[in-house]
Amino acid sequence: MNKKIGFIGCGNMARAMISGIVHSKFIEPSTIYASNSSSGKLNQIRDDFCICTTDDNLKIAKECDVVVLSVKPHLYGKVIDQIKDFIKEEAIVVMIAAGQKIEDNEKRFNRKIKLVRAMPNTPALVNEGMTAISVNTLVTDEDKRFIQSMFECFGKIEFVEERLMDAVTGVSGSSPAYTYMFIEALADGAVLHGMPRKQAYTFAAQAVLGAAKMILETGTHPGALKDAVSSPGGTTIEAVASLEKSGFRSAVIEAVIACVEKSKNMN
């Protein structure tokens, strides 16, 4: 791998991506660049990962083969206007901001440009991210393989049609928050029955982690796995019945619907 990867913006997601790329040894740290308006963040990320840093976005545009736009959505127009005439002809531009459509940003560049729209989530910080990726027609199969390998440095990826990106936001982009709420509620129930809170969080979090791993590694339908735990007349089916009575599934579905609708309105 001899491509240079540059990040414009050094927020939490950029840091997670850089950490995964460096620790996986996907490319050398000396071929990773980052720019940011805050010198404090730049100094920290340079010291932590031994990458190249600059306060000049144009340096990233001119030198890097993959440019990751990791700034807030409202800054996309300003940043693209600044760098659009300096991006390499064959460079790949990766967008990781919510609501930023490929077509809209093709117009901002006003030239032929390889665009990748990615929706990672925060578990990328612990190398367990889930990223959805859409590309425009100029992105080649070789480009896609490189981008896939880059994002696999910190989790799993799936290529999806861009029309599904709002659904992705609901099912993986925002869902860590729902899961944290579920884990907190599980732990509260255990604390109510005398378990120390720290221990309750460990039991609840590991149970959720293990259950998720069962689905991913066995490929078994989650309903079948639920049935396997729910013995006739047992404790689990009693709990399942209580959840159903409280509208657990419909509440989760409604949460996803609300999230997707909000995402659509941000476009």
Image: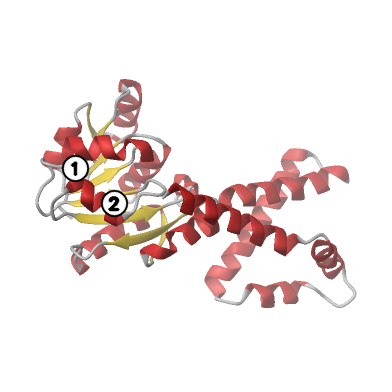
Q: Which of the two discs, 1 and 2, labels the residue nearer the N terminus? A: 1
Q: At x 40% / y 64%, what residue is drawn?
A: 163
Of residues 153 and 134, the one drawn nearer to the viewer in this rendering = 134
Of residues 71 and 18, the one drawn nearer to the viewer in this rendering = 71
Q: Is residue 15 above or below residue 161?
A: above
Which residue carries the number 1 mark? 31
Q: Is residue 251 above or below residue 225?
A: above
- Checking the image for residue 104, the label placed there is 2
For badge 2, the amino acid type reads Asp
In the drawing, does residue 203 fall left or right of residue 267? right
Q: At x 78% / y 61%, what residue is drawn?
A: 247
Q: At x 13% / y 52%, what residue is drawn?
A: 111
Is any part of residue 182 visible from this angle? Answer: yes
The image quarter containing residue 1 is bottom left
Cα–Cα span, label 1 and label 2: 30 Å
Of residues 90 and 41, the one drawn nearer to the viewer in this rendering = 90
Q: Residues within 10 Å of mark 2 (few under 14, many from 20)?
A: few
Residue 19 placement (x, y as % from top left): 36, 42
Q: Is residue 23 above or below residue 1?
A: above
The image quarter containing residue 227 is bottom right
Residue 209 placement (x, y as % from top left): 61, 57
Count every numbered label the image shows and give the total: 2
Is any part of residue 93 visible from this angle? Answer: no
